[in-house]
Amino acid sequence: MEEIYVNLKHDNPTHATNRTGKKEVAETGKSRGVLTVAHFIRFSILFIFPFFSGQRSSKSSLYLVIILSLSLLSVFLLAGLITLGFLCELCWSLISYSVLNRDQISIVIKFLKDNSLTYKKCPGGWTRFNHSCYLLSESSGSWDAAVKDCRDRGTYLVVIDFPEEQNFLSTITIEEAWIGLNDKEQEGTWKWVDGTPLSLTYWAEAQPDDSGGKEDCVHVRKDKKSWNDLSCSTSLKWICEKTPNHCTVS
């Protein structure tokens, strides 16, 4: 019985040893398993994550380029709209100027004439006013003869554009004289010889009356300040006018 006991006692350490060995192997395997996972994580951090991080960086860069491009495009579009607005404002200003009535345009022309640095000298016998030249004829004739005489001189029968010009004419006329206004083409539609419609008027009282249905031409009355319609065949003196372009430079 004692031997059996001894054997059993000897067997226990061996068994214990075996179990301990298995435990050590298991712990070693476990340690190796832990190391393997650690290496995998380490490998992932060093190689796999940078790869995906690179992809994310590329995408981010692409998005950034797109955003910057759209921003620049927006700036260009805004600049274009501002430029277009400026051009539209300029065009509108030009259109507004083009529809000014004749009186306003005459004021502008008068201002430019008065402030011109170029002095225009009139030919002998002509009278200068506001850089234009005027001539009262010596002979008398019909309205058509007056138009022809002025054209032969390279000028035209006077066109009255502004009040100062009307006042000036009263200083050079000593009697009735033809001016370049008529309604020969259409009764009641008065036009100047240069084709411009009538805007500034100095009709005498109850004029024009087209007496007898034949009064289609206009003259300055004896009072030198008002107009009257008269038969174009009536014999009167006339006033020719030269524009600044026809006058000689002094």
Image: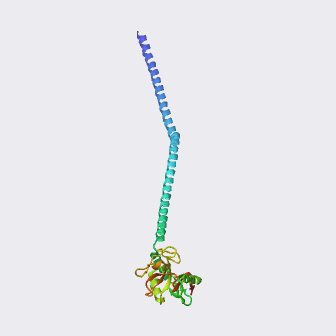
The correct choice, above or below, for 160 with respect to 82 in the image is: below
Q: How many marks?
A: 0
**Colour pattern of the rendering:** rainbow
State the residue at coordinates (51%, 46%): 59
Kindly give the residue lying farthest to the top in the view shown: 1
The correct choice, above or below, for 103 with respect to 29 in the image is: below
Which quadrant is the N terminus positioned in?
top left
Locate residue 73, reporting x and y percent.
50, 55
Q: Quadrant of residue 12?
A: top left
Locate residue 165, reporting x and y percent.
47, 83
Kindly give the residue lying farthest to the right in the view shown: 152
Query: Toward the viewer: 86 or 67?
Result: 86
Kindly give the residue lying farthest to the front in the view shown: 212
Query: Toward the viewer: 233 or 135?
Result: 233
Locate residue 16, reporting x and y percent.
44, 20
Query: Toward the viewer: 222 or 216?
Result: 216
Which quadrant is the C terminus positioned in?
bottom right
Query: Does residue 243 appear anywhere in the picture?
Result: no
State the residue at coordinates (48%, 64%): 88
Query: Toward the viewer: 149 or 131?
Result: 149
Q: Quadrant of residue 118?
A: bottom right
Query: Does residue 144 appear anywhere in the picture?
Result: yes
Locate residue 170, reporting x and y percent.
46, 87
